[in-house]
Image (cartoon, rainbow, N blue to C red):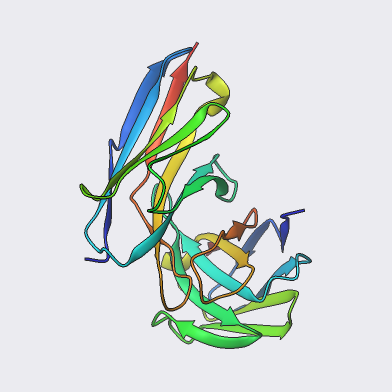
Amino acid sequence: QQQVKQSPQSLIVQKGGISIINCAYENTAFDYFPWYQQFPGKGPALLIAIRPDVSEKKEGRFTISFNKSAKQFSLHIMDSQPGDSATYFCAASMKRGYNKLIFGAGTRLAVHP
Amino acid sequence: DTEVTQTPKHLVMGMTNKKSLKCEQHMGHRAMYWYKQKAKKPPELMFVYSYEKLSINESVPSRFSPECPNSSLLNLHLHALQPEDSALYLCASSQIPTAPLEQYFGPGTRLTVT
């Protein structure tokens, strides 16, 4: 119940295409869903985050879609660029208790020119 | 400014050495975290400090000893580590510890135990 399942494990997209990464969870106590981007040898950087009262959030080329009834959320990267090539982690955190992030397994995205 | 700094960037230590990792943030955040990340895996939570007090220890071996001298600084003291402890050690902070809020990560310390 504590898990966040992320897919696909790896993704290859052509420049200008749309990258889509999916995550699913079981625990309805999760209340906050961030996405992190991590380049090799660097720390994860917070990309965008959403809460369950919103179905979609957009920041630039990055959009989170949230389906509360299905307990799924996804990251869409529009007009993908080679500079977007990185590992993406979804995560979830609960409404109560300490701010513990439960991470998905990660998706390695490669955007080819 | 959402910067968390960590030093050193790289550390190589023998199994009998004692070393420390340092993390600093000046955002006024009152929660700080240590994570361990192995290659191609997500970060794993090790410790949570809440208002300078240790709140969560995720069953981490005693060869890792955290310390929070003040609200801006977090240390991780290392002693008698094993080669399998080689990993990227990440520090993070958030505004307060008891609500789902943004966590900001530092660049990490790449630790190699020989």
The image shows residue A1 at horizontal and vertical percentages of: 21, 66
| Position of residue A86 in the picture relative to residue B53 (left or right) | left
Where A19 sits versus B93, above or below? Answer: above
**Residue B28 occupies which quadrant of the picture?**
bottom right
The image shows residue B46 at horizontal and vertical percentages of: 47, 74
| Residue at x-position 35% and y-position 29% | A20
Where A3 sits versus B60, above or below? Answer: above
**Residue A93 occupies which quadrant of the picture?**
bottom left
Which residue is at the front of the view, B73 or A19? A19
Which residue is at the front of the view, B55 or B5? B55
Which residue is at the front of the view, B82 or A84? A84
| Residue at x-position 37% and y-position 42% | A55
Where A88 sits versus B110, above or below? Answer: above
List the single residue furthest toward the front: A53
| Position of residue A40 in the picture relative to residue B71 (left or right) | left
| Position of residue B92 in the picture relative to residue B1 (left or right) | left
Tally of marks: 0
| Residue at x-position 55% and y-position 75% | B97
The image shows residue B106 at horizontal and vertical percentages of: 65, 57
| Residue at x-position 73% and y-position 55% | B3
**Residue B21 occupies which quadrant of the picture?**
bottom right
Where A2 sits versus A12, above or below? Answer: below
The image shows residue B39 at horizontal and vertical percentages of: 43, 50
- Answer yes or no: is residue B29 visible: yes
- Answer yes or no: is residue B16 visible: no
